[in-house]
């Protein structure tokens, strides 16, 4: 019997809007790879057995009698999913980001397994990039992780296993799919009600996590009734994206935290808030003392006892006080707001996440995107994911990864999504924006770096 998609996973497919693909992307920049793109392509193919879902596609049930099922793709072609590309000389980061923007804008083909990997050559210094695209329905953090998590090794000498001899299973036919769905109803007449209840349960569970912060009920109710104000971050989203990246020295962020309290996450939110304030002012937007931008901040939490730490993600609403001109007051306010998350006792410490097997950030960013899809877009203005990564070098096909940044999908009606990942002494901030509404996202990225530098300089 084929494995059926959960109601939550199916919702990611049903609720996906035209022009607003929900896949999560990641960009890994590597030193020159011995063997070039061929070696990387062989690595991807060799690691596919670690993520068997990546050779399965979604098969709908006729008449939508039940949720779709996962089935092996009999026409699976790894060369379709692993694509090769290049940037022109001189191979700058701006040229790479332009390519990433175009790749991110294109939706995944629903008739095939819901992922793609782009191997990019032509970067300056002989470097190469790996750009991944994964649909959140594919990644649940337990049975399936993001493919980027299994491509990286702690040692350059890690062997690449030979590709396995995979044979696809039989795809269930239409009659069989209908018969299985009807059989489930016969065996469990309450199946339809249980499906509806599970959807309501998902909603209630998400709401209870969001309302875990102080006064969350009042804030969530107010935001659900009053639409977010129209502005550059809340508008109709087109089908094209612009991606920018900012970077910061992790030691600078720790120095700021040590001098003024809070956590590194609090400092990062403070930096983003200051950058958003300056960006809004540069565009002539009204910024009053009470102006705030409501962010959905997914946080890795300890789930059920049998689950691994960080395998669950809870979503919290945090007001970014862009109207506050004093950065230290902003930090104090955000530290207080985020303290409600840790006070719940379920959040997972950064060092615990870093100790997870493999490179966890890609998977956790995907889980954060899943959490965002579970809430009404009226409740927040942008999504901000922050996942700590290892501070030791990682390798792919024997080559060191130099930097990595996530590209979190936009939710319909919202013009910006922010993903943050720390790695090897640095923090990388990926900003994914609607090309029409936030076409100057590179300005915002520059302001993030300037904000870090200004705060770090003040504590030196």
Image (cartoon, rainbow, N blue to C red):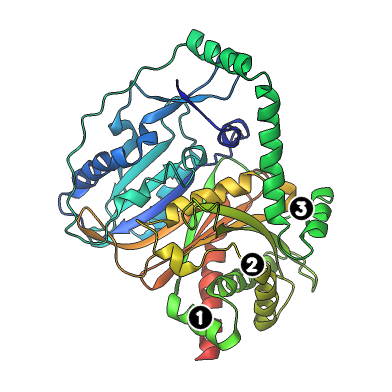
Q: State yes or no: discs 1 and 3 in contact (Cβ < 8 Å).
A: no
Marks 1/3: CA–CA distance = 31 Å
Seen as rendered, the residue at the extreme bottom is 460
Residue marked by disc 1 = 453
Say which residue appears at 68% left-offset and 64% top-offset. 283
Q: Nearer the viewer, residue 135 or 125?
A: 135
Residue 282 location (% of width, % of height) = 66, 68
Residue marked by disc 3 = 230
Residue marked by disc 2 = 276
Q: Nearer the viewer, residue 4 or 255?
A: 4
Q: Earlier in the sequence, mark 1 or mark 2?
A: 2
Residue 440 location (% of width, % of height) = 57, 59
Left or right of 203 on screen, residue 130: left
Q: State yes or no: discs 1 and 2 in contact (Cβ < 8 Å).
A: no
Residue 22 location (% of width, % of height) = 55, 41
Question: Could you tell me which secondary element the residue under label 1 belongs to?
Answer: helix
Q: Earlier in the sequence, mark 2 or mark 3?
A: 3
Q: Quadrant of residue 438?
A: bottom right
Marks 1/2: CA–CA distance = 15 Å
Q: Earlier in the sequence, mark 1 or mark 3?
A: 3
Say which residue appears at 39% left-offset and 29% top-offset. 56
Q: Nearer the viewer, residue 251 or 67?
A: 67
Position of the N terminus by quadrant: top left
Vertical order, 108 against 26 (above or below) = above
């Amino acid at each position: 019997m084929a494995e059926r998609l959960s109601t939550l996973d199916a919702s990611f497919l049903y609720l996906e809007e035209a022009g607003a693909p929900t896949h999560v992307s990641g960009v890994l920049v590597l030193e020159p790879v011995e063997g070039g793109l061929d070696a990387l392509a062989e690595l991807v193919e060799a690691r596919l057995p670690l993520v068997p879902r990546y050779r399965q596609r979604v098969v709908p049930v006729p008449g939508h009698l039940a949720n779709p099922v996962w089935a092996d793709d009999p026409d699976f072609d790894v060369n379709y999913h692993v694509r090769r590309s290049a940037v022109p000389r001189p191979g700058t980061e701006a040229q790479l980001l332009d390519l990433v923007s175009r790749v991110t804008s294109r939706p995944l083909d629903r008739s095939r397994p819901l992922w793609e990997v782009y191997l990019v050559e032509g970067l300056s210094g002989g470097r190469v990039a790996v750009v991944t695209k994964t649909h959140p329905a594919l990644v649940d953090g337990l049975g399936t992780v993001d493919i980027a998590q299994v491509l990286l090794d702690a040692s350059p000498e890690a062997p690449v296993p030979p590709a396995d001899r995979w044979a696809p299973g039989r795809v269930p036919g239409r009659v069989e799919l209908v018969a299985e769905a009807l059989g489930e109803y016969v065996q469990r007449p309450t199946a339809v009600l249980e499906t509806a209840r599970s959807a309501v349960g998902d909603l209630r569970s998400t709401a209870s996590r969001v309302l875990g912060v102080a006064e969350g009920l009042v804030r969530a109710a107010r935001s659900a009734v009053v639409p977010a104000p129209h502005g550059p971050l809340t508008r109709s989203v087109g089908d094209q994206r612009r991606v920018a990246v900012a970077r910061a020295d992790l030691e600078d962020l720790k120095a700021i935290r040590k001098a003024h309290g809070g956590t590194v996450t609090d400092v990062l939110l403070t930096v983003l808030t200051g950058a958003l304030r300056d960006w809004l002012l540069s565009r002539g937007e009204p910024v009053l003392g009470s102006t705030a931008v409501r962010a959905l901040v997914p946080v890795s939490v300890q789930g059920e006892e049998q689950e691994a730490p960080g395998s669950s993600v809870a979503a919290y609403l945090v007001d970014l006080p862009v109207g506050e001109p004093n950065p230290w007051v902003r930090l104090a306010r955000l530290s207080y707001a985020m303290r409600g998350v840790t006070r719940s006792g379920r959040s997972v410490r950064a060092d615990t996440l870093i100790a997870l097997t493999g490179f966890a950030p890609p998977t956790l960013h995907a889980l954060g995107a899943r959490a965002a899809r579970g809430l009404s877009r009226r409740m927040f203005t942008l999504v901000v994911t922050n996942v700590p990564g290892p501070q030791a070098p990682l390798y792919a096909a024997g080559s060191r990864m130099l930097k990595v940044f996530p590209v979190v999908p936009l939710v319909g009606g919202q013009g910006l999504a922010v993903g943050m990942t720390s790695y090897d002494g640095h923090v990388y901030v990926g900003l994914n924006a609607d090309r029409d509404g936030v076409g100057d996202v590179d300005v915002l990225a520059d302001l993030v770096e300037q904000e870090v530098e200004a705060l770090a300089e003040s504590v030196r």
